[in-house]
């Protein structure tokens, strides 16, 4: 989790600043309470998510637009607040994004080794292909069969579009 690492780095960077340590402890305390929370009642989960969001926002708010070391992370909390406690409301959502980070790691390493695709279109194409193949793998689907099926479907759609275009010119 990037945010957790950034909190840890903040404390390491400002070890003598007591306010930094206390702030990080307060943020982590709210997160840990959220991780420990559970309820079978959807309304209770929704309400508790709102409480966690408001509590975290109150901890972050004093540092918005300040010159304090916590400012950048406090502003990140404000920006991403709606995404931070989704796991409280929906128990199917993990409380961290480790799986997502592990999924993109091979692509990041390949990009660093190769120097990238050297064009925006190449990067977009690679991102789409990595997403497709990654999704098929996670779903346990045969990637070659799914790729072939996708290409055949795209070919059919292109043929239908071409047929319509030809028919409109003939008529």
Image: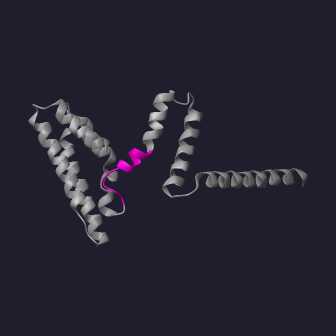
Q: Where 128 falls versus 16 (above or below)? A: below
Tell me which residue sits at (11%, 37%) in the image.
19
Residue 160 visible here: yes
Q: Nearer the viewer, residue 164 or 129?
A: 129
Q: Is residue 148 left or right of residue 139?
A: right
Residue 142 pos. (x, y %): 58, 55
Left or right: where 87 falls relative to 125: left
Give the residue at x 9% y 36%: 18
- Residue 161: x and y in percent read 76, 52
Residue 68 appears in the rendering: no
Task: Establish if 102 lies above or below 46.
Answer: above
Q: Quadrant of residue 48?
A: bottom left
Please state the extent of the stretch shown in magenta in the rendering.
93-103
User: Looking at the image, what colour scheme do you see?
Assistant: one colour
- Total numbered badges shown on the rendered structure: 0
Indicate whether residue 97 is drawn in magenta.
Answer: yes
Residue 143 in picture, x, y percent from top left: 58, 52
- Residue closest to the far bottom: 41
Quarter the C terminus occupies: bottom right
Using the image as rendered, state which of residue 52 and residue 125 is in the foreground: 125
Question: How far across and down, in percent of the image, does residue 51 sit?
Answer: 22, 59
């Amino acid at each position: 989790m990037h945010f957790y690492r950034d909190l840890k780095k903040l404390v390491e960077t400002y070890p003598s600043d007591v306010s930094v340590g206390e702030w990080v402890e307060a943020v982590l305390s709210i997160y840990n309470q959220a991780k420990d929370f559970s309820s079978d009642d959807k309304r209770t989960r929704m309400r508790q998510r709102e409480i966690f969001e408001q509590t975290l926002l109150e901890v972050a708010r004093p540092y918005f637009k300040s010159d304090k070391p916590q400012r950048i992370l406090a502003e990140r909390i404000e920006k991403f607040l709606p995404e931070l406690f989704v796991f409280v409301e929906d128990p199917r959502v993990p409380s961290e994004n480790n799986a997502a980070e592990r999924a993109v790691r091979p692509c990041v390493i390949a990009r660093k080794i190769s120097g990238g695709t050297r064009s925006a279109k190449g990067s977009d194409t690679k991102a789409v292909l990595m997403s497709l193949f990654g999704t098929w793998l996670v779903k346990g689907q045969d990637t070659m069969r799914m790729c072939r099926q996708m290409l055949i479907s795209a070919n059919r759609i292109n043929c239908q579009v071409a047929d319509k275009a030809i028919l409109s010119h003939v008529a």
